[in-house]
């Protein structure tokens, strides 16, 4: 891993954490659709932090998610629950952003924020292990 890869990963993980905080603020203020959106993006940025260490990047979200699932979830580097949570986050985000009259309950929004937290926790553990191997 190069310094450039490490720095990009760190930047993306900071972006993920900041976006998770934004999701929590949206949740607290009853902006449930926005909380779902921000939760997905928090997880997405976290996944891009992982991919940065591999020097892999894609323009389309579905390609990022597919690569992560294929190379990190299916291979056992991350638990299957991470992939399932990510898929649900992505589906809910797309519905909340693009479907007319899509309503998000507080319960759903809480679940999505919790999913993003769990994904970022798993990613943080992975990144910490990668950092320890680097030293």
Image (tube, rainbow, N blue to C red):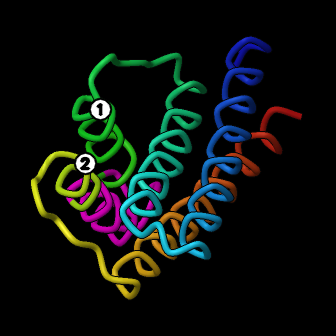
Magenta segment, prevailing SS (helix, strand or loop): helix
Marks 1/2: CA–CA distance: 14 Å
Which element type, helix, strand or loop, lies under badge 1? helix
The N terminus: image quadrant = top right
Q: Nearer the viewer, residue 66 or 35?
A: 35
Q: Which residue is mark 2?
A: 97
Q: Residue at x 29, y 54 (%)?
A: 93
Counting from the top left corner in percent of width and height, residue 16 is at 62, 45
The C terminus: image quadrant = top right
Which element type, helix, strand or loop, lies under badge 2? helix
Q: Give residue 59's quadrant in the image.
A: top left
Q: Residue at x 74, y 24 (%)?
A: 6
Q: Nearer the viewer, residue 13 or 5?
A: 13
* Tags 1 and 2 touching, CB below 8 Å: no
Read off the magenta span: 75-91
Counting from the top left corner in percent of width and height, residue 130 is at 71, 42
Task: Tell me the mark number nearer the camera, choosing from 1 and 2.
Answer: 2
Label ID, residue 41 = none
Density class for disc 1 (Cα within 10 Å; few <14, some 14-19, many ≥20) is few
Q: Give residue 46's quadrant in the image.
A: top right
Density class for disc 2 (Cα within 10 Å; few <14, some 14-19, many ≥20) is some
Counting from the top left corner in percent of width and height, residue 86 is at 34, 58
Q: Which residue is mark 1?
A: 61
Q: Would residue 42 be found to the left or right of residue 60 on screen?
A: right
């Amino acid at each position: 891993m190069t310094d450039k890869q490490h720095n990009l990963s760190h930047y993306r993980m900071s972006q993920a954490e900041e976006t998770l905080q934004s999701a929590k603020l949206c949740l607290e203020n009853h902006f449930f659709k926005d909380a779902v959106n921000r939760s997905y993006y928090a997880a997405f940025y976290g996944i891009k932090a992982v991919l940065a260490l591999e020097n892999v990047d894609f323009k389309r979200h579905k390609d990022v998610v597919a690569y992560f699932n294929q190379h990190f979830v299916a291979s056992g580097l991350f638990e299957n629950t991470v992939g399932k949570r990510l898929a649900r986050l992505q589906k809910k985000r797309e519905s909340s952003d693009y479907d007319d009259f899509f309503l998000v309950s507080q319960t759903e929004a809480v679940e999505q924020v919790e999913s993003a937290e769990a994904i970022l926790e798993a990613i943080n553990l992975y990144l910490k292990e990668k950092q320890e191997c680097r030293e």
